[in-house]
Amino acid sequence: MAQHLLVVGGNGFLGSNVCKTAVAKGWKVTSISKSGKPYLTPSGHTPAWTSQVSWNGASANEPKTYADLLPGVTSVVHTLGVLLEGNYKAGIGSALSALATAHSPNPLSKGSSGSYEAINRDSAISVLDALMEVPSDVRRTFAYISAADIFRPLIPERYISTKRQAEYSIQLRAVQQDSHLRALYFRPGFMFHPHTRPLSTPVASLLDLTASLSACVPSFLPSPGRMLRTIPLSETHGLPPATHAIANALETRPMHVESVARAICAAIELDSVAGVVDVDKMRELIGWDKKRAAQQDAPVPDSSLSNDV
C-alpha cells in the first residue's frame, strides 16, 4: 500500500528526521506545524529533501486548521512534546530558568497552550479524533512519540504522566469496533544529534556508558539499577517511584535521532508491530541488538497502558 504520511511537528527535531526518512522511502509526506515553515538546518540551510514535503501551518489542537489535509492519509506520526514547560529551548539560561519554574509551587496552568497536558496529551488526541472522523476502508496507523521514564525527578512527573495518559486515550480509540486503527507508542530514551544539538552528545556518551556497564553486570550481582528498584517507596499518581526512573536512565541506551526516525518508519511498514515500542524494539527494527532483549537480565520497563496516571 502506498503510504501518505502526516507528520505532526514535521519541522522539529524528530519530526524533520521522520519526514526525511519517509521521503527517502518514496512516501507522500505532509507536515503540519505551528509555523508551517520547511525545516532549516542550524546554519539556516534548506536541505534538498524538504522540497518533497508539503509544509502546512496548523494547530494540532484545532482540527479545523488541518482537516482538509486528512483525506487519503494512511499513517500519522505525532512528534509534538515538551520536556519542560516554558521557553526552555532559547539557551542554557532559559533552560535552567524553565527547570527551576517547573519545580515551583505554581507550575504552568494545566489548561494553557504550552502546558504538558495541552501539548503532550491533548494535541495527540485532537489529531486522532480528527483522523477517525474521515472515513477510510484501509487500516491506518497512528504513531505517538511517547518517552521512556528516565527523566524523573529532574523533570516533573507530569511530563511522563501526560505521555502515559495520551497512550491510554489513544488505545481506547484503537480498540473501538471498526476503528481500523493500529496504534504505536514509541518510548525512546535520550535522543541526540552531534550537529544539530552538539551539547546532547556528551550526555548521550555518558548514558551509553552506564547502559553498557549495567548490561555487563551478571544477574547474580546487584547492579545500581537493580538496587534502586528495591528501595521501598510508594507510587505517585500511578507511576513507579522516581528511583525506578533513575534506574531506567542508567540502563536505557540513548539513540541518535535519525535512528529513532528509521525505527518509526520501519514499524509503520510492518503490520505485525503494534502497541508499545521501547528502545530495545526500536534497535531491533533497524537491525541492532536482535538478541539483546532476550539476554538482558534487568527488569523490563513497564509497557502496560494505564489510566491511573
Image (tube, grey):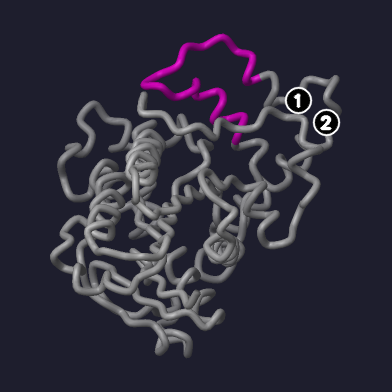
Q: In the rendered image, which quarter is residue 137 located in?
A: bottom left
The residue singled out by tag 1 in the image is 223
* Residue nearer the viewer, 308 or 111: 308
* Residue nearer the viewer, 237 or 182: 182
Over which residues does the magenta segment extend?
Answer: 228-248
Cα–Cα span, label 1 and label 2: 6 Å
The residue singled out by tag 2 in the image is 217
Dot 1: few (<14), some (14–19), or many (≥20) neighbours within 10 Å?
some
Residue at 65% x, 32% y: name it: 300
Residue 206 - label: none
Q: In the rendered image, which quarter is residue 192 located in?
A: bottom right
Residue 229 x %, y %: 62, 20
Amino acid type shown at disc 2: Val
Q: Are marks 1 and 2 in contact (CB under 8 Å)?
A: yes
Residue 200 x %, y %: 55, 57
Viewed as shown, does residue 222 lie left or right of 175? right
Residue 206 part of the magenta segment: no
Residue at 54% x, 35% y: name it: 303
Amino acid type shown at disc 1: Ser
